[in-house]
Image (cartoon, helix red, strand yellow):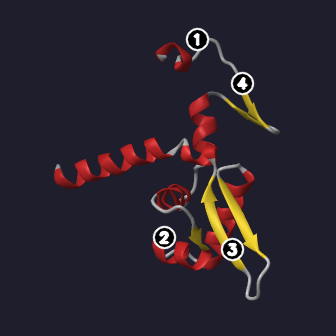
């Protein structure tokens, strides 16, 4: 399995749409870059789904504009699904996609590392 992740010694470009990346790590980091995306994904991972208002409370001090922007990017990148119910007032729920669920073990390890740092400072 380890061989699957070894980078070739010569430079190779990895593409995603019109964007070129120098390696898989750069490509993956591009999907979760930003101050809030990892936290949004983590909060969605501990719930089956979250409505917008609940997600905002879970994430904390994020602005409305930033939360909307980050959710749109996560949706565009196929990590989150936005489900809109045709009721008044509109009901919107956010779910992780299978692709989004794939990052959760990494985020869990980041959380564990954060706990380790807290206790070993």
Label 4 neighbour load within 10 Å: few <14, some 14-19, many 20+: few
The 10 Å Cα crowd at callout 2, few under 14, some 14 to 19, many 20 or more, is some
Q: Taking 84 as reference, is 107 above or below it?
A: above
Residue 32 vs 68, above or below: the answer is above
First reached walking from the N terminus: tag 4 or tag 3: 4
Residue 45: x and y in percent read 49, 56
Q: Residue furthest right?
A: 18
Give the quarter of the image for residue 93: bottom right
Residue drawn at the location 66% of the way across and 75% of the way down? 65
Where is residue 18 shown, x and y percent of the image?
Answer: 82, 39
Label annotation for residue 59: 2
User: Circle 3 sits in a helix, a strand or a loop, which is it?
Assistant: strand
Label 1 Cα neighbours within 10 Å, binned few <14 / some 14-19 / many ≥20 = few
Instruction: Determine whether 94 is above or below 98 in the image.
Output: below
Q: Earlier in the sequence, mark 3 or mark 1?
A: 1
Dot 4 and dot 3 residues touching (CB under 8 Å) = no
Q: Which residue is mark 3?
A: 92
The x, y position of residue 41, in whole percent, is 53, 56
Secondary structure beneath disc 2? helix
> In this figure, which residue is indicated by the disc labeled 1?
9
As measured in the structure, the alpha-carbon distance from the residue carrying label 2 to the one carrying label 4 is 35 Å
User: On the rendered structure, is 71 left or right of 45?
Assistant: right
Query: For the residues carrying marks 2 and 3, which lies nearer the camera in this image?
Result: 3
């Amino acid at each position: 399995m380890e061989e699957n992740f070894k980078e070739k010694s010569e430079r190779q470009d990895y593409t995603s749409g019109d964007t070129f990346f120098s390696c898989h790590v750069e490509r993956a980091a591009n999907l979760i870059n930003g101050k809030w995306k990892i936290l949004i994904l983590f909060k969605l991972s501990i719930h089956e789904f979250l409505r917008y208002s609940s997600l905002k409370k879970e994430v904390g001090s994020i602005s409305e504009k930033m939360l909307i922007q980050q959710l749109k990017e996560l949706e565009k990148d196929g990590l989150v699904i936005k489900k809109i119910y045709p009721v008044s007032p509109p009901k919107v729920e956010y779910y992780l996609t299978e692709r989004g669920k794939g990052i959760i073990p990494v985020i869990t390890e980041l959380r564990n590392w954060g706990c380790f740092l807290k206790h070993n400072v």
